[in-house]
């Protein structure tokens, strides 16, 4: 019976799980002041809930991709969601900040391997000419999480206590678990066998190595500011906690618009599109620095950052998959996992640097950290464009259906 399930239902199931996981990744941004108050920690220490999570995804994605490479895909998905639920249940009950951080690592390991295999499952259940659009549908779960999951979790935390925010995530995880059990086919194609040597085969390809570094720098550039966004909105821009919940919803809408535009713009010449996106994000960060102590203008700058913040995600993820098919066809799942790691290398490094700046009372200057990262990523895109030359277009990379 599972084999007859429409691909649309399978993609919906994956998107539901992605929604739960996306809500988990950034929930601590919204409840950061509550966590610092409960555990008596500084804002910079609270930022560890973001950077530790990112580290868990960073190391977990490639390692677990290797370990689980030949596991049944449906059983693996169910196991991932069970682990996800356990991690957030532990966070709900965490008596100390150290245990809260441990719970974040458990959830992060689930995140990394889920995003790796879900992208490939989405591509496997549709016709070859619809692969890119199927992956984009799966990623909409993350976008919707930014629009609704994080603001709702923040509202629940402010109203009923931060522990209930994590209980909310447990509920989302249960829904994702049930949807995977019901809608995902029992038998899905397994990727080709791979090994640790596959990592070397990927990173020794200059184009693949460069795009991994570009992913880390360009995607991570938002996070010196975003990790401490609630504090900036409250302490610097003067917005109340109740207003911040609404602002986070509009921020998520801006992210959704940006993702949609980013996917379309990356269709034909992804590297040129990514360069434009990074320049736009750099301008947004400059505007935030100029308006960080202003009420309404600061808010507009934050929304502008939201528009560009995750615009690069579809292009970056699809691009490395297509490059892997071109240069290392036997290592496509591992390349996908490494790019998921690269996203989180950027998050971890950027949020950590932002935390250092905040600890030194330099929250005003966190945008400059992101700008420096963007400058480096733009230079590397230019190098990669020179390496690929005129071959990097939709004809070669088959991104028409992004």
Image (spheres, grey):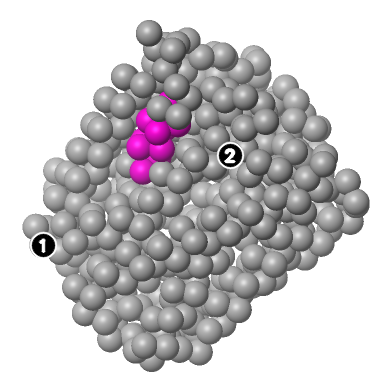
Q: Name the residue under label 2.
A: 133
Q: Mark 1 points at which residue?
A: 159
Which residue lies at the image location 36% right of the left edge and 21% below the top edge?
Answer: 183
Q: Judge depth for marks 2 and 1 and give the one in front.
A: 2
In the rendered structure, does residue 122 fall within the stretch colored magenta?
no
Q: Could you say which disc has been placed on residue 379 in the image?
A: none
Which residue lies at the image location 15% right of the left edge and 51% below the top edge?
Answer: 163
In the rendered structure, does residue 11 fall within the stretch colored magenta?
yes
x then y, percent, for residue 53: 40, 48
Q: Which of 210 and 355 is in front in this view?
A: 210
Q: What stretch is highlighted in magenta?
A: 10-19
Q: In this view, does 137 lie to the left or right of 23?
A: right
Most frequent secondary structure within the magenta stretch: helix
x then y, percent, for residue 124: 58, 23
Q: Within the image, what quadrant is residue 318 found in?
A: top right
Of all residues, the one furthest to the left in this rendering is: 160
x then y, percent, for residue 341: 55, 43
Q: Within the image, what quadrant is residue 27 found in?
A: bottom left
Badge 2 or badge 1: first in the primary sequence:
2
Mark 2–mark 1 CB contact (< 8 Å)? no
- Callout 2 crowding tier (Cα within 10 Å): few <14, some 14–19, many ≥20: many
Q: In which quarter of the image is the C terminus?
A: top right
In the figure, 81 relative to 104: above or below? Answer: above
For the residues marked 2 and 1, what is the alpha-carbon distance in whole angstroms? 38 Å
Instruction: Label 1: state its secondary structure.
Output: helix
Q: In this view, does 364 lie to the left or right of 312?
A: left
Which residue lies at the image location 67% right of the left edge and 72% below the top edge?
Answer: 279
- Callout 1 crowding tier (Cα within 10 Å): few <14, some 14–19, many ≥20: few
Q: Can residue 253 be seen in this view?
A: yes
Q: Is residue 362 left or right of residue 119?
A: left
């Amino acid at each position: 019976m599972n084999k007859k399930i429409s691909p649309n239902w399978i993609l919906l199931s994956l998107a539901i799980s992605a929604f739960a996981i996306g809500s988990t990744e950034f929930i601590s941004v919204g409840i950061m002041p509550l966590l610092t108050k409960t555990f008596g920690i500084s804002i910079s220490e609270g930022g560890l809930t973001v950077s530790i999570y990112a580290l868990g995804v960073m190391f977990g994605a490639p390692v677990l991709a290797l370990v689980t490479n030949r596991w049944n895909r449906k059983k693996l998905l169910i196991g991932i969601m069970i682990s996800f639920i356990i991690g957030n249940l532990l966070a709900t009950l965490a008596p100390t900040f150290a245990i809260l951080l441990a719970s974040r690592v458990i959830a992060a390991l689930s995140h990394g391997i889920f995003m790796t295999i879900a992208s490939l499952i989405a591509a496997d259940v549709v016709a070859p000419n619809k692969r890119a659009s199927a992956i984009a549908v799966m990623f909409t779960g993350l976008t919707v999480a930014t629009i609704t999951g994080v603001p709702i979790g923040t509202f629940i935390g402010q109203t009923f206590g931060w522990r209930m925010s994590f209980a909310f995530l447990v509920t989302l995880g249960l829904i994702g678990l049930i949807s995977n059990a019901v809608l995902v086919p029992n038998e899905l194609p397994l990727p080709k066998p791979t090994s640790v040597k596959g990592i070397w085969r990927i990173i020794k390809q200059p184009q693949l190595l460069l795009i991994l570094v570009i992913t880390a720098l360009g995607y991570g550039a938002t996070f010196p500011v975003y990790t401490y966004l609630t504090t900036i909105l409250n302490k610097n821009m003067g917005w109340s906690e109740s207003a911040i919940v609404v602002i986070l919803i509009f921020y998520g809408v801006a992210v959704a618009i940006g993702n949609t535009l980013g996917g379309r713009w990356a269709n034909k010449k992804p590297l040129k599109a990514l360069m434009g996106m990074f320049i736009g994000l750099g301008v947004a960060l400059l505007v935030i620095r100029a308006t960080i102590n202003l009420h309404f203008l600061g808010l507009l700058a934050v929304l502008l950052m939201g528009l560009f913040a995750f615009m690069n995600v579809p292009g970056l993820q699809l691009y490395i998959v297509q490059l892997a098919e071109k240069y290392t066809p036997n290592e496509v799942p591992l390349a996908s996992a490494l790019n998921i790691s690269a996203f989180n290398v950027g998050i971890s490094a950027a949020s950590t640097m932002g935390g250092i700046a905040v600890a030194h009372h330099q929250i005003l200057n966190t945008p400059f950290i992101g700008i420096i990262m963007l400058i480096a990523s733009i230079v590397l895109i230019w190098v990669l464009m020179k390496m690929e030359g005129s071959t990097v277009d939709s004809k070669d990379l088959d991104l028409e259906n992004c």
